[in-house]
C-alpha cells in the first residue's frame, strides 16, 4: 500500500505547483457562493424554514459546498480518458499495481490539496459577509472529514466509469459532461437537495449523487447526530463499493473487447 | 469595407471546415449537443426548484423570473456559439500555438473564434429561446411599440454584452495563463446572476452590475421596463432602454483591451 501513498503525494505536489490556478479557482468559487447565497436568502424572506433548513443553514451549506466542489472533483477530469484516447493507457496497464487503485490514489492526493487550499478560503471569505454556522461540537469536524473522505470515493468511482467509456467512444467529453451535470444537480451543488420537491428528492436519494456532496454538508450542519451518522456513512460506503465494483467490471469488459489505440 | 468582407468570407470557410470535422464523430457530437442543451436546462431547473417552495422572489413571479432567465440565457447562448472560443486563448498561449493566429491574413480574434467554432454549442440557445417565448405569453405586459421592439433588441444586446465580457476577461490570459478561471466568474457567474431579480442582491453588488460590469442590461433592466416594475437603484425609466448603447460602448472597450492584450503577447518560443 506504500505505493498508493507515494502516488497520492505526487498528485498533491503536482497540484500545489499551480498557484495562480488555485487563486483563480478560489475567486470563482467565492463569487458563485455569493450569488447563490443571496438567491437563497431571498427565498428565506418568504418563509422561515425549508425541511429543517433555516436561512443560516442554507447560506452555510452554500459556502461549504463551494469549498467542497474541487475536493470531490464534481466537475470531472479527463486525465484517464485522455490516456485512453492517445493509447498511453497501455503503459498504465503494464504497471505491477492495480489500475483502479492507482487512479484512486492519484485522486485522493489531489483532493487532499484541494481540501486545504480550495476548501477553506471560500468559507472564510463568505464568513466575512454572511452569518455562517460552525459545527457545534469538535467531534462534528471529525465526522465531517470522514464523510468527505467517503464522498471522494463515490465521486471518484463515478468519474472512473464515465472515463472508461473512452474505450468505446474515444471522445468522452459528451458523456463526461452529461454525467457530471446530472451529478452536480442531484448532489445539491446549486440548490440543497432538501429544497427539492418531494418526488425529485426521492429520485435523488435513490441515486449515488447526494452521497457525493449533500450528505457531508448535512453532517457539517449537525443534521445527523448520534447513530444517524452511521447511517450516512453506510449509504456513502454502499454507493462507493457498488460503483467501484461496477467500474472494475467495466474495465474487465474493456480489456476483453477493445483494441487499444496504438502509435 | 473590403477588409470586413474578406474577414467574413474567411470566417465562413473556417467555420464550415470545423462543422464538417465535428460531424466525423457523430455519437460524440449528438451526446455533446444533448449535454449542452441540458446545461442551460439545469439553470432553469434551479429556478423551478426554488419556486416549488415560494410564490415570489424579491417580488417577481416564476414567469417573470423565467423571462429574466430567457433574456440572459438566450443572449449568453448566442455569445457562447460565436465568441466563447476566445477563452481558448489561454490554452494556445500556454502551448505556444497562438503564434499561428498572428501569422494569418485574418484578425486574430476572428480566426480564433472561427477555428474553435463548435456547432454543438447551439444546444445552449434552443431551450432558453423556447422559455423566452413561453414566459412572454405568461407574464402581463401592457404592449406598446417600444416594448415590442425591446424584446429582440434586448436579446441581441445581451449576446453582445456577454460576448464582450468573454473577450475582456479572456484577455487576462496574455498576462497570466493560469488564471483563466477568473473569467468564469464573470461569464458563467454573470449569466447565473443575470437570471435573478437584481434587487435580491446586496446594494454594492447591484451597483457593480449596473455601473461597472453592466450585466443588469442583459436582462433585469429591460425586463423591469417591459413589466412596468420599478427600475432598480431608483434609476429613471429611460435608462432601462440603454442596453444597445451599453453593448456598443462595451464593443469599443473589448476591442481596445484585446488589441492591448495581443500587443503584449510574447511567444513561449518552444
Image (cartoon, coloured by chain):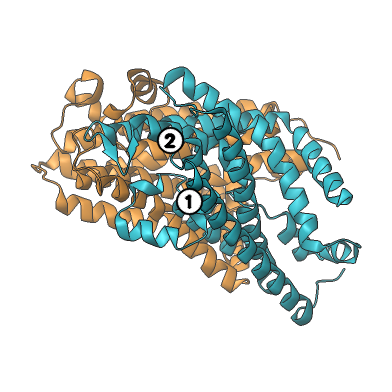
| Residue found farthest to the left | B142
- Where's residue B211, x and y in %? 37, 20
Q: Colour of chain B?
A: orange
| Residue found farthest to the front | A227
- For label 1, the SS is loop
Q: Is residue B83 visible?
A: no
**The quadrant where residue A197 appears:** bottom left
- Where's residue B170, x and y in %? 59, 35
Q: Which one is nearer the viewer's eye here, B244 or A70?
A: A70
Mark 1 closeness class: few <14, some 14–19, many ≥20 residues within 10 Å: many
Residue at x 60%, y 66% (from the top left corner): B22
In the image, residue B114 sits, relative to residue B267, either above or below, namely: below
In the picture, measured across the screen, residue A94 lies left or right of residue B236, that is: right
- Where's residue B44, x and y in %? 34, 50
What is the C-alpha distance between the residues marked 2 and 1? 23 Å
- Where's residue B226, x and y in %? 17, 38
Where does label 1 land, which residue? A187
In the image, residue B131 sits, relative to residue B69, either above or below, namely: below
In the picture, measured across the screen, residue A195 lies left or right of residue A176, that is: left
Question: Which of the image's four quarters has the C terminus of chain B?
Answer: top right
Chain letter of the residue beneath label 1 in the structure image:
A
Residue at x 56%, y 49% (from the top left corner): B6
Chain letter of the residue beneath label 2 in the structure image:
B
**The quadrant where residue A164 appears:** bottom right
Residue at x 21%, y 51% (from the top left corner): B135
Q: Is residue A195 visible?
A: yes
- Residue B190: assigned label: 2
Q: Which chain is cyan?
A: A
Amino acid at each position: 500500500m506504500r505505493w498508493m501513498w507515494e502516488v497520492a503525494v505526487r498528485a498533491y505536489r503536482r497540484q500545489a505547483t499551480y498557484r495562480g490556478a488555485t487563486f483563480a479557482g478560489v475567486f470563482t468559487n467565492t463569487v458563485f457562493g455569493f450569488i447563490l447565497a443571496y438567491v437563497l436568502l431571498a427565498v428565506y424572506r418568504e418563509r422561515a424554514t425549508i425541511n429543517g433548513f433555516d436561512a443560516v443553514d442554507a447560506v452555510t451549506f452554500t459556502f461549504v459546498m463551494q469549498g467542497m466542489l474541487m475536493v470531490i472533483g464534481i466537475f470531472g477530469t479527463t486525465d484517464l480518458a485522455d490516456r485512453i484516447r492517445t493509447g498511453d493507457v497501455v503503459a498504465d496497464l503494464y504497471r505491477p499495481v492495480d489500475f483502479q487503485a492507482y487512479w484512486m490514489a492519484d485522486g485522493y492526493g489531489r483532493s487532499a490539496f484541494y481540501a486545504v487550499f480550495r476548501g477553506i478560503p471560500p468559507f472564510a471569505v463568505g464568513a466575512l459577509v454572511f452569518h455562517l454556522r460552525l459545527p457545534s461540537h469538535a467531534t462534528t469536524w471529525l465526522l465531517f472529514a470522514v464523510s468527505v473522505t467517503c464522498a471522494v470515493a463515490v465521486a471518484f468511482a463515478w468519474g472512473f466509469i464515465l472515463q472508461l467509456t473512452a474505450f468505446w467512444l474515444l471522445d468522452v467529453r459528451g458523456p463526461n459532461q452529461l454525467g457530471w451535470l446530472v451529478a452536480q444537480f442531484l448532489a445539491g451543488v446549486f440548490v440543497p437537495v432538501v429544497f427539492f420537491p418531494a418526488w425529485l428528492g426521492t429520485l435523488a436519494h435513490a441515486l449515488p449523487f447526494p452521497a457525493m456532496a449533500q450528505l457531508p454538508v448535512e453532517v457539517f450542519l449537525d443534521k445527523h447526530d448520534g447513530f444517524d451518522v452511521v447511517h450516512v456513512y453506510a449509504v456513502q460506503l454502499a454507493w462507493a463499493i457498488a460503483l467501484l465494483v461496477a467500474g472494475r467490471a467495466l474495465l474487465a469488459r474493456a480489456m476483453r473487447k477493445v483494441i487499444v489505440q496504438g502509435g | 469595407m473590403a477588409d470586413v468582407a474578406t474577414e467574413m468570407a474567411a470566417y465562413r470557410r473556417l467555420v464550415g471546415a470545423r462543422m464538417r470535422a465535428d460531424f466525423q464523430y457523430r455519437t460524440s457530437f449528438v451526446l455533446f449537443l444533448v449535454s449542452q442543451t441540458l446545461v442551460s436546462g439545469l439553470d432553469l431547473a434551479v429556478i423551478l426548484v426554488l419556486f416549488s417552495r415560494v410564490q415570489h422572489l424579491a417580488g417577481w413571479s416564476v414567469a417573470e423570473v423565467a423571462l429574466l432567465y430567457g433574456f440572459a440565457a438566450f443572449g449568453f447562448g448566442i455569445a457562447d456559439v460565436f465568441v466563447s472560443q476566445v477563452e481558448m486563448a489561454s490554452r494556445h498561449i500556454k502551448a505556444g500555438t497562438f503564434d499561428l493566429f498572428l501569422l494569418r491574413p485574418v484578425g486574430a480574434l476572428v480566426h480564433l473564434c472561427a477555428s474553435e467554432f463548435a456547432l454543438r454549442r447551439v444546444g445552449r440557445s434552443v431551450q432558453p429561446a423556447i422559455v423566452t417565448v413561453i414566459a412572454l405569453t405568461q407574464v402581463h405586459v401592457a404592449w406598446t411599440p417600444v416594448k415590442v421592439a425591446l424584446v429582440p433588441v434586448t436579446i441581441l444586446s445581451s449576446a453582445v454584452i456577454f460576448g464582450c465580457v468573454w473577450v475582456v476577461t479572456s484577455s487576462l490570459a496574455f498576462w497570466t495563463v493560469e488564471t483563466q478561471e477568473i473569467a468564469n466568474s464573470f461569464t458563467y457567474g454573470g449569466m447565473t446572476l443575470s437570471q435573478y431579480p437584481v434587487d435580491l442582491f446586496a446594494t454594492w453588488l447591484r451597483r457593480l452590475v449596473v455601473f461597472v460590469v453592466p450585466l443588469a442590461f442583459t436582462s433585469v433592466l429591460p425586463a423591469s421596463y417591459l413589466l412596468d416594475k420599478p427600475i432598480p437603484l431608483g434609476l429613471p425609466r429611460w435608462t432601462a432602454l440603454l442596453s444597445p448603447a451599453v453593448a456598443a460602448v462595451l464593443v469599443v472597450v473589448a476591442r481596445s483591451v484585446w488589441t492591448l492584450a495581443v500587443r503584449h503577447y510574447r511567444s513561449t518560443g518552444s
